[in-house]
Image (tube, rainbow, N blue to C red):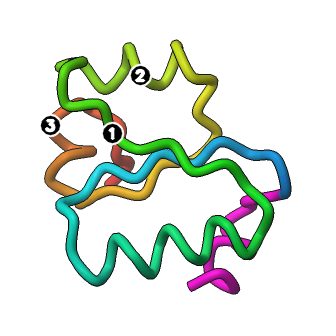
């Protein structure tokens, strides 16, 4: 997965938000982010609007389920 993230443009120091349920995929994504020396940003469920999180934490990349991104109009189809 780190190879995929690197090809997607994740660089050392980039802030990467993971917005998925805690499952094995979450752990793999977390390890891949750390392997690239990027910054892991967990989803704060207290902040309802994902756009607030993006602006507050200077998010460079998002790992999420497509349904989540479509719901907030962040997914290009």
Q: Are marks 1 and 3 in contact (CB under 8 Å)?
A: no
Q: Residue at x 32, y 56 (%)?
A: 64
Between disc 1 and disc 3, whose residue precedes? 1
Q: Quadrant of the C terminus?
A: bottom left
Q: Quadrant of the N terminus?
A: bottom right
Magenta stretch encompasses residue 65: no
Which picture quadrant has residue 49?
top left
Q: Is residue 11 above or below residue 69?
A: below
Q: Residue at x 18, y 60 (%)?
A: 21
Magenta range is 1-11
Q: Residue at x 50, y 68 (%)?
A: 30
Q: CA distance from mark 1 to mark 3?
A: 16 Å
Q: Secondary structure at mark 1?
A: loop
Q: Which mark is residue 71?
A: 3
- Density class for disc 1 (Cα within 10 Å; few <14, some 14-19, many ≥20) is some
Mark 2 or mark 3, whichever is nearer to me: 2
What residue sits right under mark 2 in the picture?
53
């Amino acid at each position: 997965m780190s190879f995929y993230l690197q090809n997607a443009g994740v660089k050392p120091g980039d802030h990467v938000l993971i917005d998925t349920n805690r499952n094995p995929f979450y752990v793999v994504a977390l390890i891949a982010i750390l392997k690239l020396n990027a910054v892991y940003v967990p989803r704060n469920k207290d902040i309802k609007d994902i756009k607030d999180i993006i602006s507050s934490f200077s998010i460079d990349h998002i790992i999420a389920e497509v349904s989540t991104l479509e719901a907030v109009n962040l997914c290009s189809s």
